[in-house]
Amino acid sequence: MSTPAYNELQQRHQRLHRLAHLQAMGQWDQSANMPAKGNEARSLALAEMGGMLHQLATEPQLKGLLDAAAAEPLSDDQRANLREMRRSWMASNALPQSLVEAKSLANSRCEHAWRTQRPANDWAGYLPLLRECVKLAREEARCLSKSSGLGLYDALMDQYEPGMRVAEVDRVFGDLRAWLPQLIKHVQARQAQETTERPVGPFPKEAQRALGLAAMQLVGFDFDAGRLDESAHPFCGGVPEDVRITTRYREDDFLPSLMGTIHETGHARYEQNLPRDWLGQPLAQARSMGLHESQSLSFEMQLGSHPAFAKLLSPLVAKHLGEQAAFEPANLNRLLTRVHPAFIRVDADEVTYPAHVILRYEIERALIEGEIECEDIPALWDAKMMELLGVDTRGNYKDGCMQDVHWGCGLFGYFPCYTLGAMYAAQWFAAMRRSRPELDADIAAGNLAPIFDWLREQIWLQGSRLETPKLVKQASGETLNPAHFKAHLQARYLG
């Protein structure tokens, strides 16, 4: 049957995908390889590319093509692809090209300065650059809100977690806030009775890199379709055909790099297993960042902190870092599951991690909605860190409100996805255990295939065929249910 309008849209999206491929590689190189003096030129080039992609995504004839394609005889997958095309078109048309280019340039400059200002604890130097990013993020929120009818923060969050709203985040985070502090105290009291052997460093960077590569191989990374590099802040970038992940190293502690690498490998395997026949089309894109974080946290927390997984990691750690009593499986598992409120989100254990996310969500929402200004961030940060985790960050900007790259990159509305992802991940493993009661024995035997097969079929190969609630229900039998996350933490840490 004839589908000329839909076919034309497919070709246009294929072109957008190929150009976005080059943009993604430029961004990866900017973070991983580019010499410092190249930043201004690269920032201008990326802003130019962002503007060009926006121009292509908002061409006037697209509306007619979208309307015409809706009347054509399409398959279910084609209709899902068209739905995602329209969603993308509406978001792009809400933003003027000048804003897209200005935001790209401001974010590149801020992120680059952050790399040296953060280690220097230079909040005063960082503040003017951050102010510009916030100003442009607020403008973006206003434009998206006007187009969609959503609230300001909802409009930004919808770019990362389509369909999720502040009311739902407030509900699940409010419940989390009610029981999490007590859980942290109970777990710490229990763990205080245990003896844990601390590893003795230093741990050379090259040895840690080799360990990271071995761990990536253990959890199935395709090295013919991606690579591992180093950056100031760990991330997963590139494109499904060529996934680039990064980590960072500390010679006094190998665990942040190791678990950060496993985390990013979860993101990477999602990208590497998106529906190949649809690459270049919106249907082949990851459904949401909450689902993306559910993959990284399935790898890092659900699997990576599983008691039996330490038995698989232990020989790899000993091989690359040398034999130590601390690397014995039982002790390694205790190291991987220590609950200790601390400064850094990306290094946090899975029990205290949600508190870091709640803090950021509450601050960035108030920031976007104009209730606070950038100058208010440090005091609010200090107060919330003390309230939620009992950690004093006063005057320590580098380990406090400057530790994350997200706000300097304009990623407002993203932070809730981390804890939503942790909730989804717990729900996935609950569903896996229902369908395969021997799952824990599989992990103990080193048989990880049932986990990856389930994720591939239920999440990875689905791409964006279904909207999030339908995908979650199809995979697990119910929509998002935070009770699974609470049950998981209680079973692992107090069971």
Image (spheres, rainbow, N blue to C red):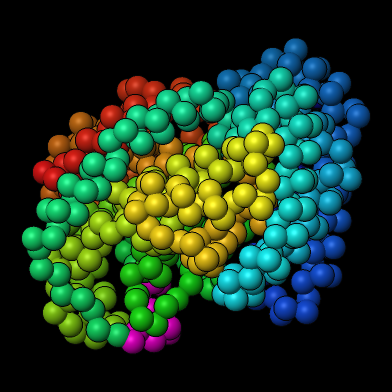
Q: Position of residue 422 (x, y in %)?
A: 37, 42
Position of 379 with respect to 332 (left or right) is: right
Q: Position of residue 467 (x, y in %)?
A: 53, 25
* Viewer-side residue, 299 vs 492: 492
Position of 434 with respect to 98 (left or right) is: left
Q: What's drawn in magenta, residue-wise? A: 202-214
Q: Main secondary structure of the magenta part?
A: helix
Q: Residue at x 46, y 49 (%)?
A: 383
Q: Dividing the image into 4 quarters, which one contains the C terminus?
A: top left
Q: Position of residue 157 (x, y in %)?
A: 60, 35
Q: Dividing the image into 4 quarters, which one contains the N terminus?
A: top right
Q: Residue at x 29, y 40 (%)?
A: 180
Position of 215 with respect to 358 (left or right) is: left
Instruction: Examine the rendering and report whether any part of residue 81 can be seen.
Output: no
Q: Is residue 215 above or below residue 491?
A: below
Q: Is residue 278 above or below residue 37?
A: above
Instruction: Examine the rendering and report whether any part of residue 191 can be seen.
Output: yes
Position of 152 with respect to 54 (left or right) is: left
Q: Residue at x 74, y 53 (%)?
A: 131
Q: Is residue 122 above or below residue 305?
A: below
